[in-house]
Amino acid sequence: MIVLGIETSCDETAAAIVTDTREIRSNVVLSQLEEHAVYGGVVPEIAARSHLEHIDKVIQAALDDAGVGFDDLDGVAATCGPGLIGGVMIGMMSAKAIASVQNIPFIGVNHLEGHILTARLAEDIAFPYLVLLVSGGHTQILVAESLGKYKRWGTTLDDAAGECFDKSAKLMGLPYPGGPNVEKIAKECKDPQSAIERFPLPSPMKGRKNCDFSFSGLKTAVRLHCEALPEGDLKRSDIADLSHAFQTKMAEILADRSEHAIKRFLDAYGTKTENPTLVVCGGVAANKLIGQKLANLCSQYDMRVSTPPLPLSGDNGAMIAWAGVEHLKAGTSHPMDLKARPRWPLDPDAEPRHGTGVKA
Ligand code: KG4
Ligand code: ZN
């Protein structure tokens, strides 16, 4: 089975060819980074126009790299939400057009599900598994029970982890996207322990008996530290120290919330899986320090940890193509009038969280 996957929900125009034997035949990602950099974040209208301009050639490149043509496809999948609606529509409509011309199934994929299922593309992982989803728009703990069945155990009450990286980076004068730039400059920190002591940061939700997150207080603390430093451009060494302290705290928060989830998972699902696994996915999963902290935590509980290889951690077409493969194998495809959804919770039964800016 050969499936084309299209991803356009944020600032990457991406397409990939993936097979049901877990082979990634191509994975083309065109980043719009430069177009948004001057604004310090993604501008939805610019993103949508750029997707429109580039989508055809990105799809063609994915086919060419894989050495296949439209006639070889068994299905076409596209992100249909959640995300920036202008971009989502462009990827979705392109997929529908290809599917109707080729007379093959169209699969509308939830972007978050794409991240969650990537673990099964990269490694041989069986349901059920525990998921820490940490991206630019979402931070959630879920249990992937089976294909299409996800129980959301916790979510952020305000910012997402990636968003907190991006906003904190901006406060420190680092370019967008914040995550990779914070990680890069933190490597220049000369004395990690004293950096942590020099820049104390809060641990929101620490020890709470649930799986929820909150990051806005962390971001505010970064702002206060920046304001307390001498006026003018921050010194590079100060930014390196603060970035290290920030990243360390972020790892600690994610580990604290994950530890609670791991205990709950082992209680509820320990006997239902031979190899209990924590899947860490979404763009923030690329962070080495966070990955290490979570790996240490998992080893204490005899849990396997699975983080996607770098090209599959940020947004990409392969994760969408693979979600398409999984659904097609299960006999699911979608009608041509499927709607794009800016918000699309994976677990419709999850209790709503109250607060400003709550993410689904
Ligand atoms: O999953 P993703 O590519 O897009 C969304 O679906 O949101 O995640 C993007 C987020 C951004 O906030 C970016 O700053 C963060 O992932 N990110 C990182 C790293 N690489 C990307 N955060 C921390 N460390 C990284 N190395
Ligand atoms: Zn994503």
Image: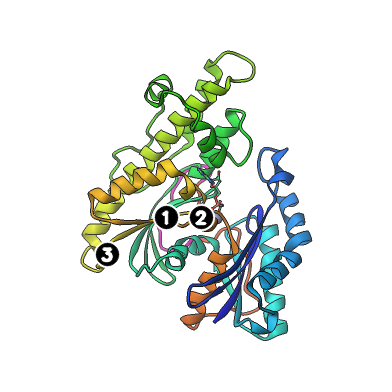
Left or right: 100 with respect to 282? right
Direction from residue 331 to residue 207 in the image, left or right? left
Q: Is residue 43 left or right of residue 345?
A: right
Observer-nearest of 197 and 90:
197
**Colour scheme of the picture:** rainbow
In the structure shown, which secondary structural element does the residue marked by tag 2 occupy? helix
Q: Which residue is mark 1?
A: 307
Q: Which residue type does callout 3 highlight? A: Asn
Q: Residue at x 41, y 23 (%)?
A: 191
Pick out the residue farthest to the top.
230
Residue 203's spot in the image, x, y percent?
37, 33
Whether ligand 1 has any atom under 8 Å from the Cβ at mark 3 is answered as no
In-image side of 22 versus 321 (left or right) = left
Whether pointer 1 and pointer 2 mark residues with C-beta atoms closer than 8 Å, the reply is yes
* Badge 2 density bin: few <14, some 14–19, many ≥20, Cα 10 Å: many
Marker disc for residue 313: 2
Q: Which residues are magenta?
A: 345-357
User: Which residue lies under the disc numbered 3?
Assistant: 275
> Which badge, 3 or 2, is on the more N-terminal residue?
3
| Mark closest to the chain's N terminus, 1 or 2 | 1
Image vertical order of residue 239 relative to residue 293, above or below: above
**Nearest the eye: 21 or 246:** 21
